[in-house]
Image: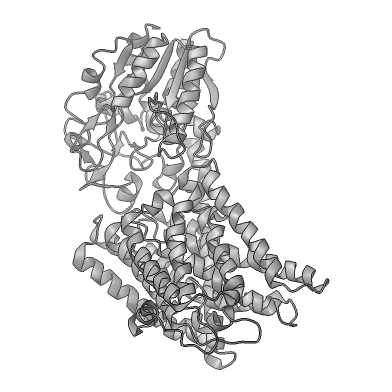
Amino acid sequence: MPVRTSDRAPEATAAPGTRLGYRADLDGVRGLAIALVVVFHVWFGRVSGGVDVFLALSGFFFVGTLLRVAESHAPLDPRPVLRRVGRRLLPPLVLVLLGTTVAAVALLPYTQWFRVAEQTGASLLFMQNWHLARTASDYLAADPMVSPLQHLWSISVQGQFYIGALIVVFGATWFLRRRSIPARAPLTVLLTILTVASLTYAVLADVPQSWLYYDSAARMWELTLGGVLACVAPWLRVPRPARIVLGVVGLAVLCACGVVLDGNSLFPGPWALVPVGAAMALVVAGNTRAGDSVADTPTARVLSSVPLVRLGAVAYALYLWHWPVLIGYLVLRDRPSVGLLGGLGVIAVSLALAEATTRWLENPIRRSESGRTRKVLVASVTVAGVALVAATASWTTHVARQDDVLERVVALSPDLYPGAAALKGFVDVEPQPVQPPLLVAHRDLPPATLDHCIAQHTNREPLTCTYGDPLSTRRMVLAGGSHSEHWLAALDTLGKKHGFRLDTYLKVGCPLSDPLAELTEESPTVECDTWSVKVLAELQADPPDYLFTTSTRTKDEGEGPGDFTPFWYVDLWRTLDEYGIPVVAIRDNPWLFHDDMSYRAADCLAGGGNSDSCAVARADALDPVDPAIEASAFSPNVSLIDLSDSLCRPEVCRVVEGNVLIYRDENHLTTTYVRTMTPDLEAQLGPATGWW
């Protein structure tokens, strides 16, 4: 959210010694931008470009504010600036975080409180974008499992920019003042250099899009470009006909951006110049000379209309509220989309909360320099902020201390916790507390993750570790993504028991493949493809006795029930056959979903469900016959393993068997349950390899 134009717009665009009128059209730009953000979030699940407009305007107004100080004889004291920024950003932010936390405790199962607590703390520290980058969250369509605080990444980017801009502008001004050099021209050059550097990084950085989207370094050019415009605005003399064209084109481009461009996969690269450029064009289109009417173009008059200006006045609060209200609605209705009437209701509630927040909290604190009301509000916000910090820190610490519980889970009694053995009828199971505990089930991870031996999103290089019997001459390679990885615990045990070495080539979100097309940075799969090519080169140079990987995956939404074998799996098998490498391919486990909406097993159980009500129908998750049988018919080097009967009953796939939780999220198995499947895997892996 950019600084309110009613406070800072005139000086930001004025040459020294002049003062322009209030830029109502820029409040209208903010109003249009927030309208696009809300509409596209609520109904279309797309990035509209509105957030990029906010970032650009934030840079324009904030740098303009700093320039006024730089060009005056005022002391370079950052404290007044920080107080103003704090008064604008923190009170509404604390209120929304407090309301969201209370709603989360009331509406969400306790297994989701940790995520909300983590992101509340990150948001209060203006570090939410880095938290989301680390967890590779997908900022697209909302659903009940998405964090109600995910949208606050942009507020964190702005907060970081304010600190950085303050240091850069005031630091450079201090240096220039000592040499009696006017500040504006050197600052223009400096900000231009920073803009080019940031945009170059956004274009050329060898990092995945899931990281780049939230990366402050990649986003910073959008704000500094606005700062450059603030520097050069007094020198611009654009004729009215040209400003009319700029305004019309800018308005049309801004409205069409979300429809034409997939911002989630393209921003903040060069395509983000489209919404940012549109915003800058609208700024220039209304940049008249001192004494002229600002609204002297058709677009300026449209943007200065009462509805858009009013939306601009509540834009910050509306941005803060609309996402948690949307997620709250989806949670209450237990559905993946809002529909027309539901969306209108979400918008109406968000507008009401935004209006109340702006009128009764933001404005009194921001505009009043003294008075009892302001003191009470500031004290209340402070107390609420401290309470939030204490509550989130306490809960995250409590969850962190549960790690010792997982250590005890390894030594569970097989009589009380038979897990997969219960499906074979080997034991009569008495009910026991489910293990691993629901609160820490997401941390019941495979050995490779705990050993930092699975390549993360930012790593395209092969990463290998050795398990099983490292001295054995018999060698198996476990390769693929996380759905290959979660068999590691059982394979490690079998390797030690039957004497074979197990080497891993694993990468998050990347099943091993043999890409046939030329690798290009524009490809959405370039990261996985690059990693796969390098792994295949190492396997070709040093072929293992067997390669263990997955043979199927669950069908995507809209493709019908069941699972399938992707064609690129078959292509990989053929390539490995050429290398003389036999393949042991295991059928993927069922995924948890209902009405095309995935869910976490621990959340369902913590919300009052049981193993049966939280189950997925076997016919929905798995085909009646393993599809890999047909897919591998012409691949003699492939041996298939199917452990579906160790995960599912004839009709349903439950989330708990033998008192052991099967899933640590919506589609990955707990390591505890995988260990109980070791005998079943042993029974099929021996004949497949001939090693026992």
x and y, in percent, of residue 461 in the image = 54, 29
Q: Out of 2 and 464, give the one closest to the viewer.
A: 2
Which residue appears farthest toward the bottom when viewing the image? 371
At 17% from the left edge and 30% from the top edge, which residue is drawn? 650
Quadrant holding the C terminus: top left
Look at the image and name its color scheme: one colour
At 50% from the left edge and 75% from the top edge, which residue is drawn? 238
At 24% from the left edge and 29% from the top edge, which residue is drawn? 564
Res 582 visible: no
- Residue 139 is drawn in which quadrant? bottom left
Residue 648 vs residue 586: left or right?
A: left
Q: Out of 637 and 529, give the one closest to the viewer.
A: 529
Q: Out of 436 and 27, give the one closest to the viewer.
A: 27
Res 622 visible: yes
x and y, in percent, of residue 444 in the image = 45, 38
Q: Count numbered badges in the picture.
A: 0
Residue 439 vs residue 175: left or right?
A: left
x and y, in percent, of residue 103 in the image = 37, 66
x and y, in percent, of residue 39 in the image = 30, 66
At 40% from the left edge and 78% from the top edge, which residue is drawn? 28
Placement of 550 over or under 91, stated as above or below: above
- Residue 25 is drawn in which quadrant? bottom left
Which residue appears farthest toward the right when viewing the image? 179
Residue 291 vs residue 139: left or right?
A: right
Residue 540 vs residue 165: left or right?
A: left
